[in-house]
Amino acid sequence: MLQETYRRLSGLNCAPAMVVCNAEHRFMVAEQLREASADAPTIILEPAGRNTAPAIALAALQAKRADPEALLLVLPADHHVVDPESFRQSVKRACDEAQKGRLMTFGVLPTRPETGFGYVRCGEALGEDLYCIAEFVEKPDVATAESYLAAGNYFWNSGMFLFRADRYLSELATHQPDMLSACEAAMAGAERDMDFIRPHSESFLASPSDSIDYAVMERTAEGGVATLHCGWSDVGAWSALWEIGDGDDSGNVTEGDVMLHDVRDSYVRSESRLVTALGIEDLVVVETADAVLVGARGRVQDIKMFVESLNAADRPEATLHQKVFRPWGSYESLVVGEQFQVKRLTVAAGQTLSLQLHHHRAEHWVVVSGVADIVRGEQQLTLGPDESTYIPMGMKHRLANRGEAPLEVIEVQSGSYLGEDDIVRFDDVYGREESSA
């Protein structure tokens, strides 16, 4: 969906993209942008989540350095748009008002009395499908949503925005000066880390946490609405994929290796194994390598309560995935047992792991595909498919892919401690600091 969001800009005259994300997602985001052929993107790493208003402030401050009047088109990465060209036309219509200094949002023509979205009420017309903002309204009950649909001047609040960087920052100075000060200090103390920008953590954590709606858009006297008619969906829950998917004759949407019998109006997704369903209706079933979700289609937004419970119990599922992205590629845990672990390493073409050693584990590498260049103590090895080597505990080692195709290696770890922090780096092309258990 991040790639879809980026490609949606095709046809607009855009500078290189800026992405604001969590530091834990940085390598995955970088890889997704590379696959989307993004040209020289800027990736800003939030030290912690502070909601959308501070995140956008970081991007606005970065953009202002190059051009104070730069227009920022703010797009969440979890939206689905059926008609990208219609979306682009709405953006183009909104540009003139944004360049004049108005803070534009995009309102989606409602197709049903939706209670899961906030709404924006349109006021005086500014042009074709352009209006002043009369007010923002919270998620309504069913009766209120039905009245909004009948009124014709209420639109779903899409969470997408267009404004000049300096205008957004000036509105923050008026309505949220503490937030602006914290973000300015964070960017003033930012450090460049490879292809990433790391704002100063302590400064950013001093910022209040608030959404752009509450912090700015509901308070500004210069808000505007550009209406959207592009088949928009906020894919904020698994049920949304059922809504936008191509259903079968029984109203089911499936992804992956799925077999159904006597199933109606359900979303069933498999990512790693066969999933079968029998005699169910209006359910969401999602199987991944990490966990399995089964829930009523109308209740899957409540998944947040499970995340809170996992965090409260300090369960690893809340923060760790089976597949972990690194600057050199990724690794995936296949089997974890008492004092052993099996991983699949995928090293991208031309990439190199750090020169390192482990105090508490040994490793056995088996090349599955590609050609591996290996440092093993004082030895230099080149291994192809079905060849292997053993790395004793405490031995310096390094793995590299000098080829043009991905390198896949099965890594078998054994030892008393298998944590990712059991690593001492001696040399790293990505500038990561040495760490040790």
Image: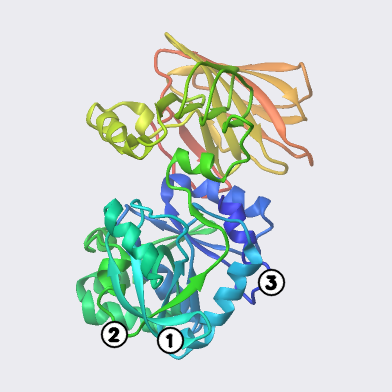
Q: Secondary structure at mark 3?
A: loop
> Which residue has dot 3 on it?
11
User: Which residue corresponds to the image point at 30% horizontal and 62% vertical from the top-left?
Assistant: 211
Near-viewer residue (400 or 190): 190
Q: CA distance from mark 3 to mark 2?
A: 31 Å
Q: Secondary structure at mark 2?
A: loop
- Taking the view exactly as shown, the residue that stands out farthest to the top is 338
User: Which residue corresponds to the image point at 54% horizontal and 22% vertical from the top-left?
Assistant: 263
Q: CA distance from mark 2 to mark 1?
A: 15 Å
Q: Position of residue 27 (x, y in %)?
A: 53, 46
Residue 51 in view = no
Pick whichever of labels 3 and 2 is earlier in the sequence. 3
Q: Position of residue 317 (x, y in %)?
A: 38, 28
Q: Position of residue 130 (x, y in %)?
A: 47, 81
> Which residue has dot 1 on it?
125
> Which residue has dot 2 on it?
221
Packing grade of label 1 (10 A; few <14, some 14-19, many >=20) is few
Q: Secondary structure at mark 1?
A: strand
Q: Is residue 124 above or below residue 179?
A: below
Packing grade of label 2 (10 A; few <14, some 14-19, many >=20) is some
Pick whichever of labels 2 and 1 is earlier in the sequence. 1
Residue 251 in view = yes
Pick whichever of labels 3 and 1 is earlier in the sequence. 3
